[in-house]
Amino acid sequence: MSRRRLSACLITLDEEERLPAALASLAFCDEIVVVDSGSTDRTVELARAAGATVVHNPWPGFARQRNVALRHATGDWVVEIDADERVTPELAAELRAFLDHPTLPDRFPLLSLPRRNRFLGGWLRDSMKYPSYCRRMFALGAYEHDETRTVHEEVVPTTPAWAARGDITHELAGTWREALRDTWAYAKLDAAQFRPQLSVTALVRGVVARPLVKAAYRLTLDGGWRDGWRGAARIALDTGTDAAVWVLAARAARRTGPDGAADATAGHYSERFPAVSAVRVVGVATSAGGAQRVTAWLAQAAAAGADATLLVPPPVAPVDLDAAAPPWVRDAVRVQALAGRGPVAIGRALDREEQVRPVELVVAADDARRATRLALRLVARGPVAGDLDAPAAPQVDAVRPSPGP
């Protein structure tokens, strides 16, 4: 089998300070494509000196510019990185090993990469839901960016997705000025693609209630308080952005009327249900016996075409997927460790799995505690099943979403 080539794609504008480190972290790639929208500093010069292919294209928006980079890539796979991000050596080795695996790249055309954020001089973890996955690596031709979106332009997952373990590091903001400037800029971009319901109830919910609930959840259940004042500040900015989006979008809708407002289906706060090639199923077990049964169920689901993941605490030994199971099961069922057996740990783990790719069915072991089942039903967006005696394929087919919004 020939070696799979990997192209790195970046979009830039006046990034001479941060770009060199980003390019150096991509030395493991076979090709680097930089699409520049008109830098007046040394960005283009530095990119060419690093061996990158530089493409000049006036700024058309985030999604369109990323698609320009994809059209100039020549590798089999592509990884998308921003100038303020770095691929750690651990992640670089992991991505290369993934591409060299005989079967994984064919089964999983999409990789979700963990991102660790640095904010005002310190690293954030729980306040930014670390590891917060971003869908940045995929087989070239399998995905493109939705050009109707003004921001949050990551690809919408429609295929099985593999979750990497190494990190991308990201410089969120080095100063308060930068943090406030970015917050306002992203709020305006989000508001441009969001049309809220112009009622008093909806506005109160969007401007006041939702941000407050979100802040409380991230500070307590997500454990954001562990990041100290930086974590609290980041959460305040994020929830403040939510409120600002509603205010700006409501003002724009009042000026333009319903015909001139942006399409709500493209909004950051609008749910999307694209056609998928494999239903996403997550199994949860906290005991050895439960792990055995759930793993067997997930193997059936994988055989029926599902994208299957098992969540289990480290002391519990599930079926040995690295040795005992046949190859198609080893490659099909991904095992992720739970931080604990309690409902909070399970809820966080399921939330992370939603970032990798939206979960459409959760399967809990029959002996799961009542608190565990309650946590799953509160967090899971899809149904939660516990009857492991039922055949896998019919349950998987029952939750397959229909195409379109």
Image: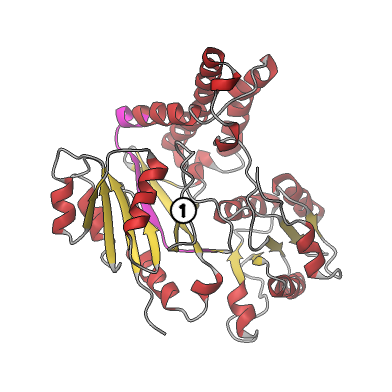
- Left/right of residue 51 with respect to residue 385 in the rendered view: left
User: Dividing the image into 4 quarters, which one contains the N terminus?
Assistant: bottom left
**Residue 316's x, y, as percent?**
67, 71
The part of the image, by quadrant, that contains residue 171 is top left
**Residue for badge 1:** 144
Q: Is residue 241 visible?
A: yes
- Left/right of residue 130 with respect to residue 335 in the rendered view: left
Residue at 75% across, 54% down = 372
Q: How many marks?
A: 1
**Residue 174's x, y, as percent?**
30, 37
- Left/right of residue 228 with respect to residue 175 in the rendered view: right
**Residue 88's x, y, as percent?**
34, 61
User: Dividing the image into 4 quarters, which one contains the C terminus?
Assistant: top right
Residue at 61% across, 52% down = 354
**Residue 175's x, y, as percent?**
30, 32
- Determine the secondary structure under disc 1: loop
User: What amino acid type is highlighted by mark number 1?
Assistant: Glu
Q: Is residue 186 magenta?
A: no
Q: Is residue 24 above or below residue 192?
A: below
Highlighted range, magenta: 162-179
Frontmost residue, 304 versus 362: 304
